[in-house]
Image (cartoon, rainbow, N blue to C red):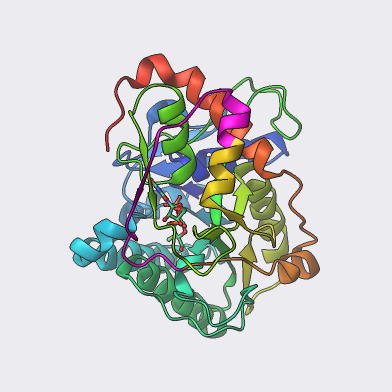
Amino acid sequence: MVTGGAGYVGSVIGRYLLDTGHEVTVLDDLSTGHADAVPSGARFVQADIRAAGATLASGIDAVVHCAAKSLVAESVAKPELYWDNNVGGSLALLEAMRAHDVRRIVFSSTAATYGEPTSVPIVEADPPAPTNPYGASKLAVDHILTSYAAAHLFAAVSLRYFNVAGALLPGEPGAGTSGQTLGERHTVETHLIPIALQVAAGQRDSLQVYGTDYPTPDGTCIRDYIHVLDLADAHARALDWTAGQAGRHLICNLGSGAGSSVREVLTTSREVTGRDLKVLETGHRPGDPAVLIASNERAGTELGWTPSRDLTAMVRDAWRFQQSIGELAGPASR
Ligand code: UFG
């Protein structure tokens, strides 16, 4: 069962699991997901994660838990939504799993659990110190999973995503034969690559670069971007890992191990699209660390995972996805 399987990351994971021979049930309340993103061939249940019991009773043997609220700024303004949904909802899901003896789970955690890093690359043993309720809510679930593994013999993996980008496009390696196109389509878009591509597509006039005076070589923030298909591959491996690991909770970063600055992302976006991007250099966005880069060593050792797609592939695939939905999307919401 993939919760949040009608969202960006969850739909690609569901698609990838189907294409690699799993049976998939998607549980999604469609609060932010899209019905047409549910992977074809999956069973679809439109429900809240707190109402997963009946679905769990229908032959589910493991859960990939992606459903969550995931906007950092919203979490600062409305923390109650994040504690209630991300923590309360996850706890209810775990209790339903326990009641139905489904004890394997792969959880969408985040780099935001670390907060401002003490050193880079970030390793999983670094102290978590989230700087916003979104990161804190995900860290709380990581802690819950540690205790459920110990007390209730769950086998759990928390995957701490760094900056996910790209799309699943028919014909690309790893995209399967479904013909489905899946990518990032948020009603409120805050992420750099989709915003840059909306500017390239003429759906926005310009984009803001949030700060050019960071202590980095070109003054802009550095992030570790990872292709959503590489991310899906990590989930499939994590799911395999949970078989036979009752009582263990594994936490793994998912990143490339290298960083790209905002300016480098914009250069790649110009190269891929062949279009100029109007840029306004503005002040810092509150809460943005200067550099976030993952060590992905543990994911390599424990899951045998290595990412294979670079920033150009991410931007190219996101651009092709953006063009495929461009006419439907209309003017971009901010
Ligand atoms: N940025 C801009 N202009 C924009 C959007 C972003 O300059 O219009 C910059 C940001 O300041 C940041 C970089 O581009 O330096 C990447 O920003 P994103 O919003 O794309 O991604 P974040 O690094 O802020 O967020 C990601 C995940 C979050 C997670 C966070 C952990 O998307 O879910 O990493 O730090 F919480």
Q: Is residue 86 above or below residue 38?
A: below
Residue 168 seen anywhere in this rendered image of the structure: no
Q: Is residue 285 magenta?
A: yes
Quadrant containing the C terminus in the rendered view? top left
Q: Pinpoint residue 49: horizontal percent, then vertical percent.
A: 35, 54
* Residue situated in front as seen by the camera: 92 or 57: 92
Query: Toward which corner of the image does residue 296 lie, by quadrant?
Result: bottom right
Residue occupying the point 55% across, 28% down: 319
Number of numbered discs visible in the structure rendering: 0
* Residue situated in front as seen by the camera: 323 or 221: 221
Residue occupying the point 64% across, 54% down: 235
115 left or right of 169 in image: left
Residue occupying the point 62% across, 28% down: 272
Magenta part of the protein: which range? 269-289
Residue 109 seen anywhere in this rendered image of the structure: yes
Q: Pinpoint residue 198: horizontal percent, then vertical percent.
A: 41, 29
Q: Residue furthest top?
A: 327
Give ligand 1's quarter of the image.
bottom left
Q: Pinpoint residue 303: horizontal percent, then vertical percent.
A: 75, 63
197 left or right of 330 in image: right
* Residue situated in front as seen by the camera: 242 or 305: 305
Query: Toward which corner of the image does residue 291 lie, by quadrant?
Result: bottom right
Q: Is residue 250 magenta?
A: no
Residue occupying the point 43% across, 25% down: 36
Q: Pinpoint residue 315: horizontal percent, then vertical percent.
A: 59, 36
Q: Is residue 2 above or below residue 155?
A: above
